[in-house]
Structure formats: C-alpha cells, structure tokens
Image: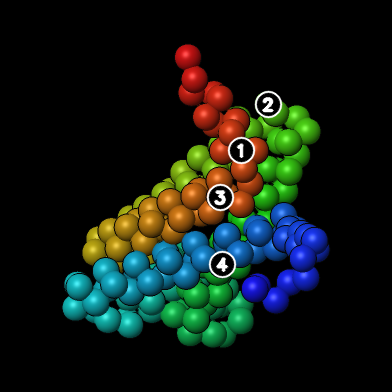
Amino acid sequence: MSGIAEGSVVVPTRRSRWTDGVLVGLVAAIVSTLILLLAGAMGGRGWHILTDAGMTALPATLGAATGVSPALSYLLSHTLLYLLAGLVAMGLAGLADRLPPLVTGLFLVIIIIEFGFLVLTTESQALGRIDAVTWRDLLIGHAAGSLVFALGILRSHPSLRQALVRGYEW
C-alpha cells in the first residue's frame, strides 16, 4: 500500500503567491545567467562575460555604491530585479483574479519592463560601457530569462492561463 491509511485524504498545500513570485524570479534569473555564461563561453570570454555585464548602468551604479566587483554587482542586481519582478507580477496576477481587466495591465507592465531593459542596455552599449558582443549576449540571456519568467507566471497562476486562452477564442 502507499503508507496512507484508507479513507484519509491528503490535501496538497498551496504555496503563497509571494513564494511563487520569488521562485519564478529566482528560476528566471538563474536561467538568464546560465544562458549568458553559455554565450560567453561560446564567444571565448568564459566567466569574464559577467564582468563585462557588470559595466551596464544599474550594476555599475551598485558596484560604485558598494565597492563590489562588476561581476558580483551584476549578479546581485540581476537577481534582485528578477525577484522583485516576480513578486510584483504575482501580486498583480492575484489582483487580476478579482479585476480581470488587470490582465492587460500585467502584460503592459511586462512589456514596459522589457523595453526599459532594452533601452538601458542599448544606452550602455552606445556609451561604450559594453561592447556589441556583450550587448548581444545580454539580450540573448535576458530573452531566455523572460521566456522562463512568463512561463513560470502562467504555470503558477492557472487563472491567467485560462484568461489568455479565453482571450484568444473566437
């Protein structure tokens, strides 16, 4: 037998949306960093790609304020932003259950965040903080992380998935 007494019901516990937000953000940050490292390894830069990525606007500011290395400032700022995005996204997803039009707002916020990332990295490349190869690798890593982030939100919040399916029905 399964070790559970007959007649007993095991009710799976549901994590809070905040825990889901942290998990989605953390997994997306890890995937994005791994893809960045893979792109760096394929380009012959290896671990040095993290130092190059640390020269972009936000990590460079964090590094200047705290005195940590560019690579560590990139990892810290990158991970914290994904965690924050996960918490905000799951919070908005919870509100969207009560106010369905907020689903559109959630996707607009995600688009604005993605556009902001593109603008900041392009600015760093234009100012000469990073080279074109690092810029490309950052975009590839971020695209992979964003895809995992969106899939994680949809996986952990079934009502959003259902709203999307209903929205595309004719």
Badge 1 amino acid: Leu
Name the residue beneath numbered marker 1: 160
Residue 55 screen position, x and y as percent: 41, 71
Look at the image and name its color scheme.
rainbow
Name the residue beneath numbered marker 4: 26
- 94 or 140: nearer the eye? 94
Q: For the residues marked 4 and 2, what is the alpha-carbon distance in whole angstroms?
A: 27 Å
Please report the residue visible at 61 percent of the width from the left and 64 percent of the height from the top: 23
**Does 11 appear above or below 77?**
above
Q: For the residues marked 4 and 3, what is the alpha-carbon distance in whole angstroms?
A: 15 Å
| Closer to the eye: label 4 or 3 | 3
Q: Quadrant of residue 101?
A: top right
Residue 10 screen position, x and y as percent: 76, 62
| Closer to the eye: label 4 or 1 | 1
Q: Please report whichever mark, 4 or 3, sits nearer to the chain's N-terminal start.
A: 4
- 158 or 90: nearer the eye? 158
Please report the residue visible at 50 percent of the width from the left and 81 percent of the height from the top: 72
Q: For the residues marked 1 and 3, what is the alpha-carbon distance in whole angstroms?
A: 9 Å
Tell me whether the residue at label 2 lies in contact with that at label 3, contact meaning CB atoms closer than 8 angstroms.
Answer: no
Q: Relative to residue 43, is residue 123 drawn left or right?
A: right
Q: Which mark is residue 155?
A: 3
Q: Please report whichever mark, 4 or 1, sits nearer to the chain's N-terminal start.
A: 4
Badge 2 amino acid: Pro
**Does 135 appear above or below 169?**
below
Neighbor class of circle 3 (other Cα within 10 Å; few <14, some 14-19, many 20+) is some
Neighbor class of circle 2 (other Cα within 10 Å; few <14, some 14-19, many 20+) is few
